[in-house]
């Protein structure tokens, strides 16, 4: 079972009619959905699994490293409803013919979403704001209020590798903007539009680096913590775009959102209190 810092999706999707390729895509959606449910800055791990049956039934299992709280359950339904509405909008507007311009769910490579209609862009924008409002504390923890960014900025003149120079310049410009927007605040910046554009461009350029083995090797040899920082600072936006792409995929829409009765089942916590003997003769 794969694992990330914040979440993981259970890969065994029980259904006799789902092939391996579709299972991979569904699993990637679960991974991304689990990631956007994370709220606490530290020590929160969320896992999602799903069973998709032939009788229009979708059962989603949710667990975290404590008891699944009502706020997580409630936010799941908020996100799910927004994704369902996005799916309906894509279907009605026939924007799904443009899905090749969006990200690929299996191998996220960000594309420009500006080809969507104004109404669709507004819905996607509102969805992103909802996600970042819920998960901004976690984003701040990853960003460490500029500490990791400051170190990256200090080392950036050394990134003379041809594959790194251009994307790193754009990344540094965008992260500088984000750092200024955040300031000393604990809340999502008031100018969310500017924040959204900056994190989108930064994530797109980070993906260029992560997909180039030579750049990854070079960056790792200089300072592997920078590579980890770039992955973390972009992962929430990456998850958001995977979910948006899922609503624009005809196959995924019908597997998850159209005509499906969804049941959410929290996995009970197995935490127990164990008392150790205080004296030798109690053993």
Image: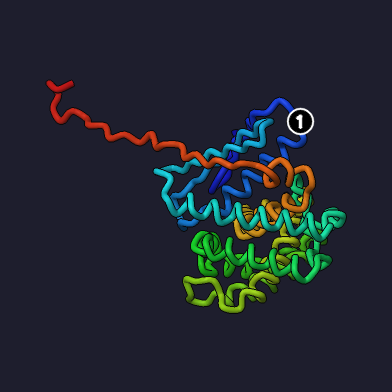
Q: Residue at x 59, y 55 (%)?
A: 79
Name the quadrant of the C terminus.
Answer: top left
Q: Is residue 153 left or right of residue 159?
A: left
The vertical placement of 58 against 37, above or below, is above
Position in image of residue 166 (x %, y %)? 79, 67
Position in image of residue 174 (x %, y %)? 68, 71
Q: Residue at x 70, y 58 (%)?
A: 86
Name the residue beneath numbered marker 1: 19
Secondary structure of the residue carrying numbered label 1: loop
Q: Is residue 219 left or right of residue 144?
A: right
Q: Residue at x 13, y 27 (%)?
A: 279
Name the quadrant of the N terminus.
Answer: top right
Position in image of residue 159 (x %, y %)? 73, 63
Evaluate whether residue 93 shows in this view: yes
Q: Is residue 30 left or right of residue 93?
A: left
Position in image of residue 157 (x %, y %)? 70, 69
Which residue is more in the foreground, 205 or 51?
51
Quadrant of residue 21 in the image?
A: top right
The vertical placement of 17 against 230, above or below, is above
Which residue is more in the foreground, 122 or 131?
122
Q: Is residue 6 left or right of residue 128?
A: left
Which residue is more in the foreground, 65 or 282?
65
Quadrant of residue 110 in the image?
A: bottom right
């Amino acid at each position: 079972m794969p694992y990330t810092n914040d979440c993981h999706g259970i890969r065994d999707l029980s259904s006799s009619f789902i092939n391996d390729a579709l299972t991979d895509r569904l699993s990637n959606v679960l991974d991304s959905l689990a990631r956007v449910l994370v709220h606490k800055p530290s020590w929160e791990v969320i896992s999602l699994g799903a069973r998709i049956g032939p009788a229009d039934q979708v059962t989603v299992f949710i667990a975290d490293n404590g008891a699944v709280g009502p706020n997580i359950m409630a936010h799941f339904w908020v996100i799910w409803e927004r994704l369902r509405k996005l799916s309906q909008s894509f279907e009605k507007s026939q924007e799904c013919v443009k899905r090749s311009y969006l990200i690929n769910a299996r191998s996220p490579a960000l594309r420009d979403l500006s080809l969507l209609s104004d109404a669709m862009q507004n819905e996607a924008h509102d969805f992103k704001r909802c996600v970042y409002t819920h998960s901004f504390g976690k984003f701040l923890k990853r960003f460490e209020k500029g500490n990791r960014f400051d170190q990256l900025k200090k080392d950036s003149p050394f990134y003379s590798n041809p594959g790194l120079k251009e994307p790193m310049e754009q990344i540094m410009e965008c992260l500088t903007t984000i750092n200024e927007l955040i300031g000393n605040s604990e809340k999502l910046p008031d100018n969310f539009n500017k924040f959204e554009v900056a994190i989108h461009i930064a994530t797109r350029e980070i993906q260029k680096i992560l997909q180039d083995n030579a750049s990854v090797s070079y960056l790792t040899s200089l300072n592997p913590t920078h590579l980890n920082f770039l992955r973390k600072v972009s992962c929430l936006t990456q998850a958001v775009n995977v979910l948006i792409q899922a609503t624009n995929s005809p196959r995924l829409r019908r597997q998850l959102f159209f005509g499906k009765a969804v049941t959410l089942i929290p996995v009970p916590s197995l935490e127990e209190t164990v008392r150790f003997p205080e004296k030798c003769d109690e053993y």
